[in-house]
Amino acid sequence: MRLTQVMVFLVLLVPMTVSVWAGQQLDVDDGSQVTITSPQNGQTVGTAFELVYALKKGTMADHVHVFLDDTYQKGFEGQFTNVPTGRHTITVKVATHDHDMVAVSDTIDVVVQ
């Protein structure tokens, strides 16, 4: 009886986890290309700034996932706000319709002042 209760708990936990999960990393290069065009690598920015990137979709690409210091920015709409001062890493990863990420990304560092 105790095993059944644990299994039910795990089943209920999975959908809640998926809603904040960026998907799994696939070891596939589908021909996509992504390039962060603004800000430039090493640029000094304010605590609020726009992220601009160019995406050429390959055979599996649907959209991108944006990460700030390795933290997935769910629902990112192009503008960072209230970023703490200091050095930060921004990564844009190409994702499939199912939110899995192919082996195509671009990364820059910025200094927030």
Image (spheres, grey):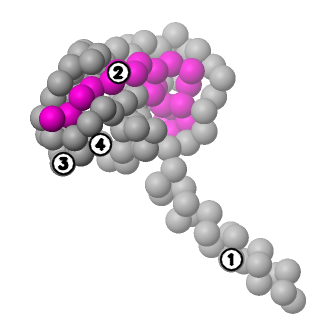
How far separated are the C-alphas under marks 1 and 2? 40 Å
Q: Which of marks 2 and 3 is nearer the N terminus?
A: 3
**How packed is label 4: few (under 14 Cα within 10 Å), some, or many (20 or more)?**
few
Residue bearing the label numbered 2: 108
- Give the secondary structure at mark 2: strand
Dot 3: few (<14), some (14–19), or many (≥20) neighbours within 10 Å? few
Q: Tell me the CA gap for discs 2 and 3.
A: 18 Å
Q: Which amino acid type corresponds to the residue marked 1 in the rendered image?
A: Phe
Q: What residue type is labelled 3?
A: Asn
* 10 Å crowding of disc 2: few (<14), some (14-19), many (20+): some
* Range covered by the magenta-colored residues: 93-113
Give the class, few, some or many, for how many residues have Cα within 10 Å of label 1's Cα (few <14, many ≥20): few
- Residue in view at x 45 percent, y 27 percent: 93
Q: Distance between the residues labelled 4 and 3?
A: 14 Å
Q: Is residue 55 visible?
A: no
Residue at the spot of label 1: 9
Q: Residue at x 41, y 19 (%)?
A: 106
Mark 4 or 3, nearer chain start: 4
Q: Does the magenta stretch include residue 11?
A: no
Mark toward the start of the polypeptide (1 vs 2): 1
Q: Which of marks 3 and 1 is nearer the N terminus?
A: 1
Reading the chain from its start, which is encountered first: label 4 or label 1? 1
Secondary structure under the numbered disc 4 in the rendered image: loop
Tell me if label 4 and label 1 are in contact, CB under 8 Å. no
In the rendered structure, the answer to whether residue 6 lies left or right of residue 57 reads right
At mark 3, the secondary structure is loop
Please identify the dominant SS of the magenta region: strand
Q: In this rendering, would 93 be left or right of 25?
A: left
Q: Is residue 4 visible?
A: yes
Which residue in the structure is indicated by mark 4? 76
Name the residue carrying label 3: 82
Q: Are marks 3 and 1 in contact (CB under 8 Å)?
A: no
